Image (cartoon, coloured by chain):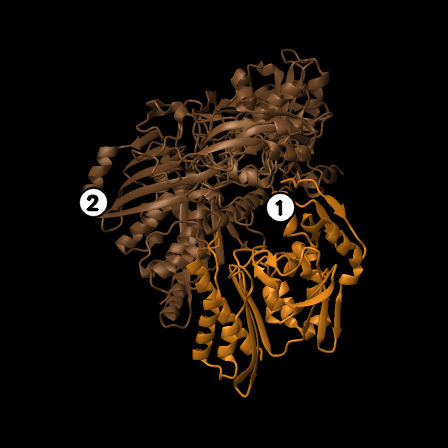
Amino acid sequence: MIPSAFTFYKPDNIEKAISLMADFGDEARVIAGGHSLIPVMKQRLTDIKHLIDLSGINEIKGIEITGNQISIGAMTTQVELINNEELFKKAPIIREASLQIADPQVRNLGTIGGNVANGDPANDMPGLMQLLDATYKLSGSNGVRDVKAREFYEGAYFTVREDDEILISISFDAPSGGYAYEKQKRKIGDYATAAAGVILKVENTMCSSASIALTNLSDTPVYCDKAVDIILGKEIDKNILNQVTEACVEQSDPVADQRGPVEFKKYVAGIVIKKALTRAIERT
Amino acid sequence: MDDVKTPSREERKSALSGLGTSRKRVEDARFTQGKGNYVDDIKLKGMLFGDFVRSPVAHARVKNIDTSAALALPGVHAVLTAADLEPLGLHWMPTLAGDKQMVLADGKVLFQGQEVAFVVGDDRYAVADGISLVEVEYDELPVVTDPFKAELKDSPILREDIADQKEGAHGARRHPNHIFTWEAGEKEETNKVLEEAEVVADEMVYYHRTHPCPLETCGCVASMDKVNGKLTVWGTFQAPHAVRTVASLISSIPEHNIRIISPDIGGGFGNKVGVYPGYVCSIVASIVTGVPIKWVEDRMDNLMATAFARDYWMHGKISATKEGKITGLWCHTTADHGAFDACADPTKFPAGFMNICTGSYDIPVAYLAVDGVYTNKAPGGVAYRCSFRVTEASYFIERMIEVLAQKLGMDSAELRSKNFIKKEQFPYTSALGWEYDSGDYHQAWEKAMTSVNYKQLREDQAKQLQLFKDGKSRKLMGIGLSHFTEIVGAGPVKNCDILGLGMFDACEIRIHPTGSAIARLGTISQGQGHATTFAQILASEIGIPASDITLEEGDTDTAPYGLGTYGSRSTPVAGAATAMAGRKIRAKAQMIAAYLLEVHDDDLEWDVDRFSVKGAPEKFKTMKEIAFASYNQAIPGVEPGLEAVSYYDPPNMTYPNGAYVVVMEIDVDTGVSDIKQVYALDDCGTRINPMIIEGQVHGGLTEALAISMGQEIAYDEQGNVMTGTLMDFFIPTAWETPNYETDYTETPSPHHPIGAKGVGESPNVGGVSAFSNAVHDAFKPFGLTQAHMPHDHWRVWKIAKDLGLHS
């Protein structure tokens, strides 16, 4: 469990980091909290020649809230997300979901940027960001650009990020309505067997806005647009919840692993989706 | 004035912290401060590191190994292959089970993770780089992972080295992939009873492959001193003396020139009993390079290559009268031993003590056969926190009791009670040949049933079932019962040996002039707290406070010969040796006291920490005074000093037992189980340190929880290990661990000097059955008879699905 040799860099501003990325191309990787990257380096599943640590770049840390606009620096740790009271007031689902990531030791180092940018479908934050319709700010040699979380993921560990781009921040509008993030896992520290996030609003018994996203149920996070179309404008009853759940499960495409076969995962997906829907509705 | 100064008998007794005291563990001060000294803490001058190139495939011919690129790498000193070891005769090594095992791949590999080459370099980094540069050409062969397919006519032959051998270490072999058939009991009589029985339950019970996974993995530092010819090996050895003897036999280094040291060990659980290629390669590399070599497994190596446990397919038939009196038991076990038979069992017992499988019950006739087979999996078959194959045996009988109860339509608690061996039947000879020393199973069972309010639990369960049937809940309640009898303390030299070494154990005591002492034993603590508890045994035996007694184990140059610590043998065997050595000290002390008090030996009586004159308690000599006298008085006919050694060959095994109850709630849709109650009553005979017993029970129950509810070593059909990291190999954290209630009865062993039986493994033996039975019990109303462990979410979900509970 020893990684192959690499050169370590710790730039103190984003320009330097980008310039290192531009110099080394696909031989370079940035490291944030390292909880995904270091294990694969130790197993030599990936060979990284240049490792660029982002922890010295203060400009991409911290949580900014202006009115309903929330912007989170990529190097903000999960424990900071959990402990920020203002963020909790504006978007309580962030704390609810963050508390279900791994364990306290991991959350002390793990960052939101690393969690979303790595492209691991098992991570919780990508689904959550699709749920919130967040925007990722990427900075590279060709400048800064915005990408919607719902358009960022292409496949497991494949995203639209270019080799020389670094995710610097994530922004979204404070959600309104009921919310829930439900996750079934085998034990503390495990990735989801199936997880689902729901945010919805009910006005005059009708669903006036909704968002649903799934974690670890496909090779990317799944934003359940078809299910959202079904529930929008409808009166919420048992029948509609069944239809919505079914539509979500239909959009899922899990793979078998030690957590269980596909059939089981789809079944449990249905259960966690329904639990999330029910709890979100209770909170409206 | 004198009254104030003179402590009472009780006060003197309590000052000793002897037997029955919840003395705090003396080991913990260093462990909790990070001051332990483990193998990986050992750093010697000039020390190099070694590690393995391991096979990525489960079965292949090794066509070529090219080490040139690795050797060209700066920092790499040597790369050993089987070809290098062959001239020394060390490319294969004997296993504890009478088989042999490749140290490094000799022409082929037989399991994923098998050791292929050993790279030696400056540090771990250079070695890891060297490993990645060794080019091995594999020619893949068909793989056998299913033990039931191992003996098919056209199955690939795994062990070509012994393909033509019709006779193995344990008798006839009927197929190149067959290792042994081992039988116990009366075959024909048992078949006859089964044929004529009123009721027979027939079930296949699988105890899956798992792994002890101690916190510290296996490792060693080997140092060959070429000046004085002495080899010193620090290693994670549960049996240091046995390692010394085996090392001498296979290396031809004289035994007095080998020193084996087990430093602090971070958990063993059977993982550190066997001899592994890493030890052999480190020793050879140290001889070759002339400098010390360190080898320490990483977690994946540990899970993939060293010492699996269980993997027994146990087909059982149990017969009874309509009233529920058991009349016979039959069992055929298919044992998946992996690529080499490296089971750590007493040599004459290729299936360990599986013939304890009649459990706690008075079963008139029984028959057991075990067939061991080779597959393309890692070797091992260790006793993971249990005596040899005792958890398998206990799980088997406790499942068979449940399926029989179902067949009889009888409550399984009542069925157990009806068939327990009665108190007055001890010593009891079982149908499969063991002599149970003592027990009061009915008392323990009744205490357990009362403590958990069994009747109320069944009523609650019925209510929950009704809610489920009415569609008001998706949860079922399960009540898991188990009563177990272990057989531990191997063992009597007449039938227990490892490679010819009788399984006695030893203790040597020296009393210092000022009345403190050092005791050395042939065992080695891996977390059990020997330094705490053995000092307590001695404190009670020789009247010296436990805190004044140093306990030392693990250095073969100083400790007396013993067979080590596993199979709950330390207290039954070494604990007995300790008491017996203490009694020798006391006998000599009595002579010294008699001389000092000018009375006859027989006029003295032992009184806690002193000898006093019978009828005149004010005339006495304390052990402290006697100790000093032994160093400064010329006593006619008595040698100076106060020392003793005892080698203890136990007359019998000990039979700890207990009654466990687990209550859980199971969500049939998610497969998630919520453990509501765990009650564990243990009878380990005399209780040396109740606090340590409680700790042992908590730890063992947690491992039992892990094994039954998720922990496994799984392979895919190509022989790839699917559970090579702690992400997939379940180790419960505090979060997953429920609350435990512990309880006890105390039935001393009649043949053990202090009546103690051993307890460290009981909770694993009894716990697995209780957890698993709870899962089965929840689904019993829907007709479930057997569902194999581990009961993780998806497998529990599958039970519900197959029973039609999802529609």
Q: Are marks 2 and 1 on the same chain?
A: no
Kind of element beneath mark 1: loop
Where is residue A44? Give x, y as percent.
Answer: 61, 42
All told, the count of numbered labels is 2
Where is residue A206? Give x, y as percent.
Answer: 52, 85
Parent chain of label 1: A
Residue B327 placement, left or right of B292: left
Q: Amino acid at mark 2?
A: Ala
In the foreground, B473 or B102: B102
Where is residue B682? Give x, y as percent.
Answer: 48, 45
Q: Residue furthest front?
A: A142
Q: Quadrant of residue B329?
A: top left
Q: Which residue is mark 1?
A: A46
Residue B283 placement, left or right of B412: right
In the foreground, B474 or B92: B92
Q: Which residue is mark 2?
A: B197
Colour of chain A in the rendered structure image: orange
**Could one spot residue A18 in this view of the protein?**
yes
Q: Residue furthest right?
A: A12
Parent chain of label 2: B
- Vertical placement of B12 versus A158: above or below? above
Gap between marks 2 and 1, in whole Å?
63 Å
Q: Dot 2, how many residues are within 10 Å of its Cα: few (below 14), some (14-19), or many (20+)?
A: some
Residue at 38 percent across and 72 percent down: it is: B471
In the foreground, B98 or B629: B98
Where is residue A148? Give x, y as percent.
Answer: 64, 69
Q: Which quadrant: the N terminus of chain B?
A: top right
